[in-house]
Image (spheres, helix red, strand yellow):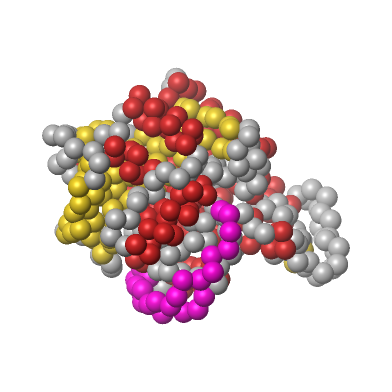
């Protein structure tokens, strides 16, 4: 998203199965962040090799071209046929396909799915607000670490519908949950969060708006943000590599934690467990549809500004090629089986909303259109196309502004 993060200090924190001391400052822009022009420029010295189709052979030694791409990248890209996708797979029973596709995703998350650690929640910093109560809850999303989350509960007897709110990336690590829930417990984070809210959310805190509308809201920090950071931009790739060396995965951890958070939220006495949705913007949107694919605790999901086809990202000049933030959304080997919309389709025929900005530089229109076509085909095959809400906002970029929020809120009121 938007601007450079000047760096927010030094701190040690636990990362998955190992402890890492992450030091230094610096930031940049990444997936969920618009790269500056100098960072977007290709770094190849000399002309790029040309490959004519997937069967072409490049003579001479392999090279790295167009920035960090191998010169045979068109051939690799052409090999991505997504054979496990619904419609490509030989499995014709949707229930059987869904189980098979989810099992493949879960396998390639690397992080195991059999997490039975009790949540053991501890509630603190309770405060009455206008129409709802805010509090912090610390809970075990995995056996390795306890995580602090913001929990908002509307006034009234309940049980209430609920939203698992998932924050963006944005190369801004000093705040995580505070990007979406107004921090009543920290004036320094409040100042940072207000600036972020003005920039991307029309000055609103989406979580507080939802709570005032009658939804229980849970929002936690992903690893590297807020209480679990702050991470520096150029440390992300090393962190992900250390996870791999430890037999684990940074992206897999985030996916598992989000699914566990959905289970915790659905299990609260104050929540109507059949009326829980995930909502997210940018990387949070990726997290929302991914969580819906992996968790049956979610009845719906709304994803704003993160959906495309993988092939449309793996082209020279795309922000994804810069690495770093990509590791939060990279499950090794998964593209040999499923594309992004194919994974989201595992959630069908539950209600799903996908918004994009027509001027979003991170997700060009062709990629969004291709992904939407794939999604539409899945829901149509279930005779549930009316449950899929796809919309492009041609005048908007990579934002989740008030009129988009209002439409998401009205949609939630309808589907939950």
- Which residue is at a point 29% across and 40% down the rendered structure image? 211
Q: Is residue 95 magenta?
A: no
- Which residue is at a point 18% across and 44% down the rendered structure image? 268
356 sits to left or right of 263: right
389 sits to left or right of 40: left
Confirm whether residue 217 shows in the render.
Answer: yes
Q: Is residue 121 placed above or below 92 in the rendered structure?
A: below
117 sits to left or right of 98: left
* Image coords of residue 17 (percent x, y): 34, 71
* Image coords of residue 189 (percent x, y): 38, 62
Q: Please tell me which residue lies in front, 365 or 123.
A: 123
Q: Please tell me which residue lies in front, 404 or 229.
A: 404
- Which residue is at a point 86% across and 63% down the rendered structure image? 47
- Which residue is at a point 62% across and 48% down the rendered structure image? 362
* Image coords of residue 331 (percent x, y): 49, 56
Q: Is residue 376 placed above or below 238 in the rendered structure?
A: above
Q: Is residue 18 magenta?
A: yes
Q: Main secondary structure of the magenta part?
A: loop
For the C terminus, the image quarter is top left
Residue range corresponding to the magenta coloring: 1-25
Dividing the picture into quadrants, the one containing residue 122 is: bottom left
């Amino acid at each position: 998203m938007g601007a450079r993060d000047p760096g927010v200090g030094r701190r040690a924190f636990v990362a998955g199965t190992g402890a890492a001391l992450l030091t230094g400052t610096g930031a940049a822009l990444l997936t969920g962040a618009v790269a500056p022009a100098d960072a977007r420029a290709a770094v190849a010295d000399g002309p790029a090799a040309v490959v004519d189709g997937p069967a072409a052979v490049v003579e001479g030694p392999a090279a790295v071209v167009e920035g960090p791409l191998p010169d045979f990248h068109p051939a690799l890209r052409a090999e991505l046929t997504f054979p496990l996708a619904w419609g490509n797979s030989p499995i014709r029973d949707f229930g059987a396909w869904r189980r098979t596709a989810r099992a493949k995703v879960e396998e390639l998350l690397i992080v195991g799915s059999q997490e039975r650690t009790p949540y053991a929640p501890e509630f603190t910093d309770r405060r009455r607000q206008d129409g709802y109560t805010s509090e912090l809850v610390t809970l075990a999303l995995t056996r390795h670490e306890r995580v602090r989350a913001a929990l908002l509960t509307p006034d009234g007897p309940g049980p209430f519908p609920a939203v698992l709110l998932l924050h963006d990336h944005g190369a801004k690590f000093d705040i995580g949950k505070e990007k979406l829930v107004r921090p009543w417990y920290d004036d320094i984070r409040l100042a940072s969060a207000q600036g972020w809210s003005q920039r991307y959310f029309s000055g609103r805190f989406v979580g507080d708006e939802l709570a005032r509308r009658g939804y229980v809201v849970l929002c936690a920090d992903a690893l590297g943000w807020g209480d679990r950071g702050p991470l520096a931009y150029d440390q992300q790739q090393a962190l992900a590599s250390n996870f791999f060396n430890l037999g684990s995965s940074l992206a897999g951890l985030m996916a598992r934690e989000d699914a566990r958070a959905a289970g915790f939220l659905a299990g609260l006495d104050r929540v109507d467990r059949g009326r829980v949705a995930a909502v997210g913007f940018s990387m949070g949107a990726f997290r929302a549809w991914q969580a819906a694919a992996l968790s049956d605790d979610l009845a719906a999901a709304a994803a704003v500004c993160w959906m495309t086809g993988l092939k449309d990202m793996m082209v020279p000049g795309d922000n994804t090629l810069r690495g770093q933030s990509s590791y939060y959304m990279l499950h090794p080997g998964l593209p040999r089986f499923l594309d992004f919309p194919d994974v989201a389709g595992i959630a069908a025929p539950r209600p799903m909303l996908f918004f994009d900005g027509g001027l979003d530089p991170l997700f060009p229109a062709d990629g969004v259109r291709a992904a939407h076509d794939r999604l539409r085909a899945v829901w149509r095959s279930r005779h549930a196309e009316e449950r899929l809400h796809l919309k492009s906002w041609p005048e908007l970029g990579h934002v989740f502004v008030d009129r988009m929020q209002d439409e998401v809120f009205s949609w939630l009121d309808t589907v939950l």
